[in-house]
Structure formats: structure tokens, C-alpha cells
Amino acid sequence: MITQIRPFPKKTNLLESNVSGKISKFRYQSEPKKKQIIEIITVPNVGRQQNQKNVAITLDAKLIQSILIKNYSHVRITEVKTPKCLVNLAKRKPDLVFSGVKYFEFDGDQVWLNDFLDLHKISYIGSNHAALDREHNKGLAKSLIKNAGISTADYVVIKPNSISAHNHLRMAYPVFVKPIIGGDSIGIDELSVVFNRQQLDAKINQIFSLLNCDVLIEGYLTGREFSVGILEDELSGNLTAMPIEIIAPKNNRGHRLLDFDVKRLDQETVTKVKNKTLHEKLSKVGKSAFVALGGRSFGRIDIKLCAKGLPNFVEANLMPGLSKGYFYRSCALNLGMTYDEMILLLCRNRVSISGEKTISLDKTHRL
């Protein structure tokens, strides 16, 4: 495995910031085209799978190219099929790689794209490999969050072939049971809220059988659910937090859960957080969690309120989808961004570290 290049970011005091206000409107189309070279990297999708294990963000490469070409003279799409493709990429040394690919598999070996780009000092959108590993394992993420002094529900990790999980619990029922890895709420359904030992064993066995991974059991948070989009100004390190509320319909058991079917069928409602005090509390937790996990560039932090109404970290996504999902909606509802403006900002923000003047945010967004 290629050695990590970028060190863990320094912690800053995130709890003093004011996140009210709006970002300045961007009028990219009125600016002359930049000379920087942008390369969109994709991988072959054999069998046209909906979810590829080695891809964190499924991009519409041609759409992204059509947006970026408005401001950059050289935007190309490259499908990486062999190690030679990566060698040629390093020789071209573009100013920025725009990609959602995590890693490539060549003859059984994994090569992480961001490791490769770090090694060759090529900028890219998103966080590095080490940060992605931290958020990928939800148990590890919660451990780091807890050590950073950020509120999160009590939890325990159960491995296959363990003695009954009931014996490991140090929390009262009900509890919430989910896979320790994976996204899109895979493995989460109405049986994830567990009220007794029999239900607990049944749900754990279901996850072991279907997903073959460890299980995370955590105290059930009964409050409202939110997601906080995060944008980082690469030059200053300032973070902008963009909370949204996500309201799932009640299921047959009376619970509002963002389970797999709710997301798949797009049944949830997404709204702006209008209460200023709640907006600030969610923003503080979102920013703190982003830094604790070593996030960079952009990401999304999921939060739920406990019975006392306090925000608790649930999980993170440091490579959130770039379709019109939760991250885009957090940008649109909080900052009034169009989809094109979001894509151009993500690109220009990273290109700016190699010399281009960065986009300025309203000062009320800065730390």
C-alpha cells in the first residue's frame, strides 16, 4: 500500500463560529476561461452495477465535464483500465482530478486513487485515504468522535461468532442495530429498532448472513434527524456548515427511520433548518466531527437529537454523492446554490491551492 502523504489536520476551535448568513452568488459564466487542466477519472462498470465497491461517488462524467468546460479550457474524461493509465495520468499531471473512485484493482492488488495522487502531488476533490478509512468503519468513527468530546450515542461492536450480543450490552433497550460499514442505509429496515434480546439476535443474524460484516449496536436516538453539509475553504481552512432536516415517513411500527427502502423510493422530506439556535448547534457538531475525522474539501455529517433535544453524531460521509441528493440540497437550501455552482465551487476551491484565487465566503461563515 502506498504510504499516506497528507498528515492528520490540526484541530481548531470550531465552537466559537457563527454560521448564519449566505454565500456570495457566483457568476462563473462571466469570467474568462481558466487554463488549468481538469481530468475526470472513471473506472469501467462491468455489468453496469448500480453500486461498485471501489466507487464512492457515482458521477455523470459527461454532465460534470459540460459544467466544468464553461470555466476551464481543458477538461477531459479518462477511464482507468490498467496501471499504465495511471502512469500516463502522472505524466500529464493535471491541475485537478475530479473523481469519485476510491481504488483500482489490478491483478488482485488495490491501488487507492488518492494515495497515488498524493504521491505525485496532484490535487483532487475530497478527503484522503486515511480519512475515508476513518469514516468507513462506523465503530472507528464513533470512537474518534467520542475521544474528541463530541456527543454520540453509546455503542458496542459485535463480531461474527460472538457470544450473545445481549451479554455485551451496557445500555438499555431500545437499541439501534446496523452494519458497521456501508452506505445508502443498506442493512437498515424497520427491524433495526430493537426492544428485546430475541429481536436483537434476529437482526444481528440477518446482518451477518446478508452482509457478512461486524454489527454496530447503539443507543436509540428518538429525536429528529439532520444532515450537515460541510464546505472547506482550502486556502484558509475555514468551514461552512449547511444543516438540513430529513423527515422520514412513519413505518408500520410507528418509527421514522431513514431505512434502505425510504431512500431508494425517495420518500423522505428535506427541509431547511430555520431555528437559529438549532442551526448553530448542528453546525458546531458537524464542523467538529469533520475535523475529528480528518475531513477535507467537503463532506456530510449525519446527526440525530436525543430525547433531551441535544445533537448527537450518527455517522459521516466524506465522499457524499454529487447528484441532487442530501449534499446538493444542503448547498441549495442554505446557500442558494445551483447545481452547476456547487460543482464549479468544489473544483475551483481545490484548484485554488495551486495558485488560483479562491472563492470568498461571507465572513459570517468563517471560523
Image (tube, rainbow, N blue to C red):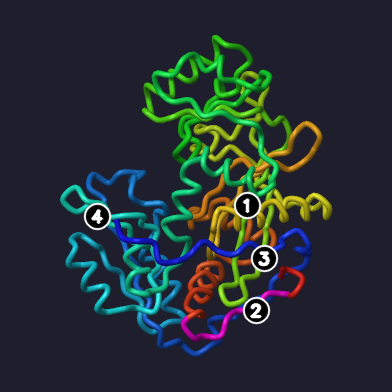
Q: Which residue is identified by label 3?
A: 336
Q: CA distance from mark 4 to mark 1?
A: 34 Å
The amino acid beneath tag 4 is: Pro
Q: Nearer the viewer, residue 313 or 339?
A: 313
Q: Position of residue 192 (x, y in %)?
A: 56, 24
Q: CA distance from mark 3 to mark 1?
A: 24 Å
Examine the structure image and report whether residue 74 is included in the region drawn in magenta: no
Q: Position of residue 38 (x, y in %)?
A: 38, 76
- For residue 68, above or below residue 308: below
Secondary structure of the residue carrying numbered label 2? loop
- Mark 4 and mark 3 lie on one chain; the one further toward the N terminus is 4
State the predominant SS element of the stretch in magenta: loop
Secondary structure of the residue carrying numbered label 1? helix
Q: Which residue is identified by label 2?
A: 360
> Is residue 254 shown left or right of residue 343?
right
Residue at image position (77%, 51%) is 281
Q: Which residue is identified by label 1?
A: 289
Q: Which residue is identified by label 4?
A: 44
